Amino acid sequence: ITIVAWTTVRDPVAFDQFEQLAAAIMEAYALKDSAFRPGVTVSEAAQSVDEIHVLKFPSYEAFDRYRSGDKLLALVPLRGKAISQSTVYVSTTEVDYAAQE
């Protein structure tokens, strides 16, 4: 499955700490993660976002185990300090438009 998370940072130092700890936990779930910090917004209607993650988990069950695991749950206070807003999109469907000729 593919997860896209848009994040607005509250505390940059706490955010970097949270991300490093969460990344170490994610490794146990065999996922691929890429993150970027948008420098330019092309759309005037775009939401203000400090960082965007694209994550791939092998299954929804693996994503659920990651989210409900004790190690990640222990980071909830740090996450609250670090992040003011997060929007998460989950998809089990991928579309390859190039292959649909």
Image (tube, rainbow, N blue to C red):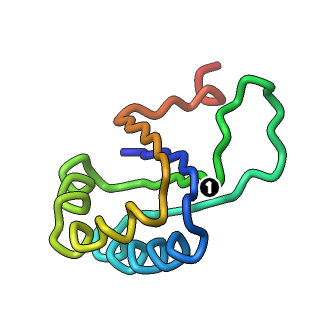
Q: Is residue 90 shown above or below 55?
A: above
x, y (%) of residue 46? 70, 30
Examine the image and state in which quarter residue 89 appears: top left
Q: Is 73 above or below relative to 91? A: below
Up the image or down, 38 lies above or below 29; here it is above
Image quadrant where residue 42 sits: top right
Q: Residue 68 appears in which quarter of the rendering?
A: bottom left
Quarter of the picture holding the N terminus: top left
Q: Position of residue 96 (x, y in %)?
A: 56, 31
Classify 10 Å Cα crowding around label 1: few (below 14), some (14-19), many (20 and above): some
> Residue 58 location in percent, x, y?
31, 55
Q: How many marks?
A: 1
Q: Residue at x 26, y 69 (%)?
A: 72
Is 66 in front, or is 41? 41
* Residue that appears at 46% across and 55% down: 55
Q: Which residue is mark 1?
A: 51
Describe the element under mark 1 as helix, strand or loop.
Answer: strand
Task: Where is residue 94? Give x, y as percent.
Answer: 46, 34
